Amino acid sequence: MDVDDLIILGHAVPDQVEDWYNCVCLAGWSPTAGFVRIFPVPLDSGISRWDVISVKLKRDHRDRRAESWTIKDVKRHWENIQGLIQTTGKLEREKRLPLVQRLLVGCVEELWQNRASLGIIEPTQVEGFFLLEEIFHPQPLRVDGITVPRPARTYPTHPRIYYKCSRCLGKSRHDHQLMEWGAYEWMRKAPEDLDQFWENIRLYDPEFKHYFFVGNQSSQRTSFMVISVLSFQI
Ligand SMILES: [Zn+2]
């Protein structure tokens, strides 16, 4: 599938990776292809949120979710990914909130009912926190003296968010892991000041309206995560 109108909505830190260390999962929405997830993408692809990208995609036999794709020939061109995935523009600021509102569903459970693996919800009763894991898979923080990004499961702590959706079908609040790459980067760079992250993204600031771009896990499709927090100053 060739897509030339994919609007990037989030970068997720990989949950589990084998040989793909320095990579993220990119996800977004295309007017022609709908929601799209691309994995793996190198950390240094230079692509940011709201970029419009052009990319040639193919199916990945390891991930059968309808929205999941991999870049054609990605392994062969890993060091020179710019030839395979190009930023062609950026969605204008005034078009972002209308797009998000047009794609909204009432609750993450609706996504599961519709067999959708990506979607956007409007949260209420939001509370961010960091959960200390008893079991994790440690990896060296530093390689050649430089701190390196790592997949999510190698961190001892995970950012999570309690929330209800605007038309929530759940009895209690959802409790979902935040997979946003920026959250993991904050944990890596400022481990002594974790709670500042919620201030950084203005999670409780009444002057900001938030939407959650959510997706499920390939191995556990009923289990959803927050891929990114889309914030708008009001
Ligand atoms: Zn809900």
Image (cartoon, helix red, strand yellow):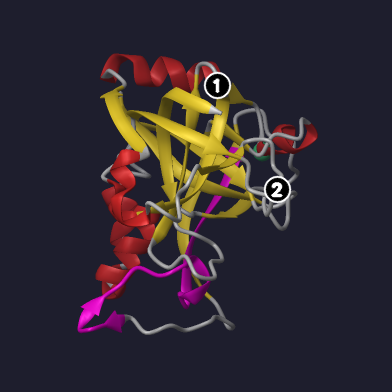
Task: Determine whether 14 is above or below 72 in the image.
Answer: below
SS for tag 1? helix
Q: Is residue 206 visible?
A: no
Q: Amino acid under label 1?
A: Leu
Image coordinates of residue 187 in percent, x first then y, are 34, 68
View quadrant of ligand 1? top right
Q: Residues within 10 Å of mark 2 (few under 14, many from 20)?
A: few
Query: In this rendering, is residue 18 above or below 55?
Result: below
Q: In the image, what residue occupies the spot 36% across and 34% down? A: 231
**Nearer to us: label 1 or label 2:** 1
Whether residue 163 appears in magenta in the rendering, the answer is: yes
Q: Position of residue 193 (x, y in %)?
A: 27, 69
Quarter in which the C terminus is drawn? top left
Would you say 173 lies left or right of 232 here? right
Of label 1 and label 2, which has the lower sequence position?
Answer: 1
Numbered label attached to residue 103? 1
Q: Secondary structure at mark 2?
A: loop
Amino acid at pointer 2: Ser
Total numbered circles:
2
Residue toward you, 18 or 189: 18
Magenta part of the chain: 142-164
| Residue situated in front as seen by the camera: 112 or 3 | 3
Residue plotted at (35% across, 15% down): 95
